[in-house]
Every structure is written in C-alpha cells, then in structure tokens.
Image: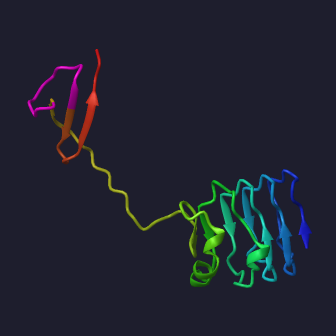
C-alpha cells in the first residue's frame, strides 16, 4: 500500500513495485500516471490531480469499484487499458463521459491524413450575392476550392 495523497506531487514512479496492491494519490499535481506494471493493483485513488495520461494497461478488471476513483482530472481524456470491453462494461461509472474514454491506444495519433490545399480567392459578395469591394458590411469570401468565409471589415 502506498499513501501519498495531499502532497502536491507532480511525478510518481512506480516501476518495480509489481506487488503494489493499493495506491492512494489523490489531491496532488500528478500529470502522468503509469500503473501498467503494477498488476496486483486492486485499489487506485488518483482523483483530483492534473492527469493528462493514465495507463491502466495490464491492470485487470479486479480493481475494486468502491476502492477506486480517478475523477476530477479535467485534462484526462483517454485512459489506456488492455481489455476494452471489460473496462467499458464494468467501469464506465469512473469516467466523466462527456470528455473521458477508455482506449487501447492513447497515442493521440489518428489514421486521418491531413490534406492541405492552397486556395485562391474566387470572389467577394455581399449578403445578396452581388460581387463587391465595399467594406462595413457582411461579406462572403468565396474560394476556388468551394470554401466560404464570412467577414465584416470595418474601416
């Protein structure tokens, strides 16, 4: 058991503590927490930190629901796990579901390829669709790639 709550800790290295069963680290300033090597862990309280990454991979669904909490980490979106169905089915109540989720890959990389086009201004129109060069009114900037920007330029 490791109790280190209310200490303003920013880093916690648990490598080598493979028999660690309980971690109480709430009310600190932890940014990253990796407990993936702590496979005996069944109690984890790391709420109210500044976590941006939490690695629970290799941790089984043996975490005790009433002995674990990692809420109140407003910058924590992705929580890395190995058995996604187990976590989604049994531990969904641990999450702020509006912005947190479990995943097997929290690298932040996607398979979406960014495509950039150098667009050129085709024409500028007013609210009625008439081409204009006037200012002090709502203008539509229409580009050759089909995109549109709405602007009001006050002079």
Which of the image's four quarters has the C terminus? Answer: top left
Nearer to us in this view, 61 or 94: 94
Residue at the spot x=63%, y=59% of the render? 76
Rendered residue at 69%/74% (across/down): 56
- Residue 154, x across and y down, in percent: 29, 18
Query: Measured along the vertical axis of the image, is residue 14 above or below residue 48?
Result: below
In the image: residue 83, left or right of residue 13: left
The image quarter containing residue 131 is top left
Residue lying at the far left in this picture: please name it. 130
**Count of numbered marks:** 0
Q: Residue at x 77, y 63 (%)?
A: 46
Vertical position of residue 74 compared to residue 42: above or below: above
Q: Position of residue 28 (x, y in %)?
A: 81, 54
Q: At which x and y percent is residue 105?
A: 56, 72
Q: Position of residue 150 (x, y in %)?
A: 26, 35
- Compare residues 50 and 65 and report the one nearer the observer: 65
Q: Compare residues 81 and 88 and report the one nearer the observer.
A: 88
Model colouring: rainbow
Q: Which residues are magenta?
A: 127-139
Q: Would you identify the image quadrant in which residue 74 lies?
A: bottom right
Q: Is residue 134 magenta?
A: yes
**Is 66 on the left-hand or right-hand side of 135?**
right
Task: Please identify the residue farthest to the top as the structure is shown.
Answer: 155
Q: Quadrant of residue 1?
A: bottom right
Main SS of residues in magenta: loop
Is 75 magenta? The answer is: no
Q: Residue at x 73, y 77 (%)?
A: 65
């Amino acid at each position: 058991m490791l109790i280190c709550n209310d200490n303003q800790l920013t880093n916690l290295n648990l490598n080598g503590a493979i028999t660690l069963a309980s971690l109480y680290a709430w009310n600190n300033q932890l940014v990253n927490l990796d407990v993936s090597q702590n496979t005996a862990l069944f109690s984890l309280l790391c709420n109210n930190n500044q976590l941006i990454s939490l690695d629970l991979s290799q941790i089984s669904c043996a975490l005790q629901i009433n002995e674990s909490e990692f809420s109140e980490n407003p910058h924590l979106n992705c929580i890395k796990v190995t058995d996604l169905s187990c976590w989604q089915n049994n531990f969904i109540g641990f999450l702020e579901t509006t912005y947190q989720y479990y995943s097997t890959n929290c690298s932040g990389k996607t398979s979406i390829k960014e495509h950039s086009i150098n667009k050129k201004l085709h024409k500028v129109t007013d609210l009625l669709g008439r081409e204009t060069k006037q200012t002090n009114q709502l203008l539509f900037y229409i580009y050759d790639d089909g995109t549109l920007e709405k602007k009001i330029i006050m002079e």
